[in-house]
Image (cartoon, helix red, strand yellow):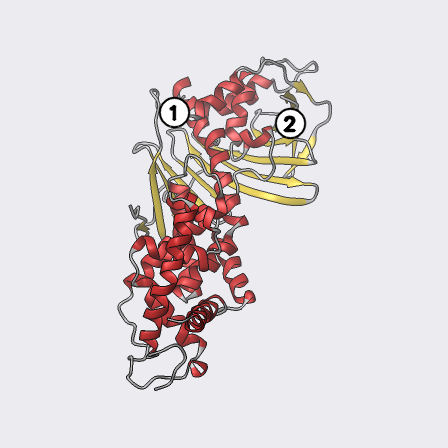
Amino acid sequence: MPPNTERRRLLGRLGFSRRGTEGRDEIVDALHAHAGLVISAASRITGNLADAEDIAQDLAEKLLRSPPSTVDSWPALLKTMAVNKALDQLRRRRDWSDLPEPEAVTTPEAELADAERAAALRAAVAGLPEREGMLFSLHYFGDLSQVAIAEQLAMTPNAVGVAIHRLRKRLTADVRQRLGLVHSGDTV
Amino acid sequence: MNSIGYDKDDRFLDDCIESVREEYSAPEVQSATAQFRATLPDRAVSTGGRFMRWAGGAVAAALLITLVPQIMPGNGGVAFAQVQSWFEDFRTVYTTTVTTQGDRELSRIEIWATADGSMRLESGPVVQILDASAGTMHTLLPGDRVMSMPVPMEEGGAPASSMEWVQEIRDFQGQAQRLPETRRIDGQEAVGFRLTIDGITVDLWAQPETGRPILMELMMANDVTMRTRLAFDQALPTDIFTVPSHYQPVHSEE
């Protein structure tokens, strides 16, 4: 017969630690509640729903394996993690062959397909430095406010606003170049 | 760049952003979201409250019973001490715990355990295996993957933070009441003992001849009931406490 110590150990293992159960349940609840936000943000960046599901699963596994000690905003945290993972995956892609080579003869903007625009923007975002990529993606693909982004990235809201403004100019030029657009809507 | 050009550039980038945002329709995103949600583990408990301590802990709840002073039934028959002894002397135990609210099932948890500390837990898609000798909990994930993490062990071998829960049970002082009527469970007659712990009523049903526990019921607030079927000393499959060899470990990305 197992001694009391062994029995206590076994019986303790068969029950859940109250603290561990509550923390785990909070994570599970947050993932359920904000699953749509995670999938949406990740799919906008990767352009692939299956990839977005994989990213969401990786994110869930990471959180359950290493629970955060405190969370001020689950939506903001989950979006930030999803955007970060999605950008990593985007940058790992090597084949951008679906994009047309920039040509000297321009294409009228009106004739550009949505898919071409989306692909060019993704490629441009993937080419940004890590922090800038996060800033832009959290705001335009993760729908986070400048204040929320500032909290997640340890910046001031004003700095976030200035950075986004500069990024818009930079990305506009980059995307135009990728699409073979020389001037703003002009045709050569 | 003049103001007209600047406005055009703004609209151009916004159009590109919109192309990205609207690439998938709402139903497509909702479908992917539902698929992701289906992969998430169940909550350990489905409602709040003190019965959280009992989730998946059928045998652990029985530990409480072992701390209750035994009572001799007034009209003979199996004594509560006999029922308690099954939780001390078992070699293997298999439990199935079903939690319901009214007639709605909230959760279902199965546990296999041996006296030497090996344990397997299954709840929905979640499978966990405790390797007591290595102090490691393995969680089997979809896609034939396994996530392993150490289980902090205290002196004496008990997982850290679990003793807090056990100690709270040990502090209980009360007595078990022999229920006046027998009950037919799975085709056999059973005698019952009732305890009340922190406002939670616990009924333990056992075979009258041997005191072998076969069913434990916890009745809680909001019409929530937890029923645990118990099977002691059954032969268990030899491979249920091992991680299948073809499972790939999940590594931390950091």
Residue kind at label 1, given as amino acid type: Ala
Residue B163 % position (x, y): 44, 22
Q: Quadrant of the N terminus of chain A?
A: top left
Q: Is residue B123 visible?
A: no
B183 lies above or below B254: above
Tell me the distance, in whole angstroms, between the alpha carbons under discs 2 and 1: 27 Å
Have a look at marks 2 and 1 and say if they share a chain.
yes
Residue A149 % position (x, y): 43, 48
Secondary element at tag 2: strand
Disc 1 crowd, CA 10 A, few/some/many (<14, 14-19, 20+)? many
Disc 2 crowd, CA 10 A, few/some/many (<14, 14-19, 20+)? many
B35 lies above or below B96: below
Report the disc number at residue B192. Answer: none
Q: Quadrant of residue B120?
A: top left
Image position of A81 (left or right of B67): left
Chain letter for mark 2: B
Report the disc number at residue B203. Answer: 2
Q: Which residue is mark 1?
A: B158
Image position of A106 (left or right of B122): left
B212 lies above or below B223: above
Residue kind at label 2, given as amino acid type: Asp
Q: Quadrant of residue A6?
A: top left
Secondary element at tag 1: loop
Residue B204 % position (x, y): 62, 27
Image position of A149 (left or right of B157): right
In-front residue for pair B219/B213: B219
B138 lies above or below A7: below
Q: Is residue B184 visible?
A: yes
Q: Nearer the viewer, mark 2 or mark 1?
A: 1
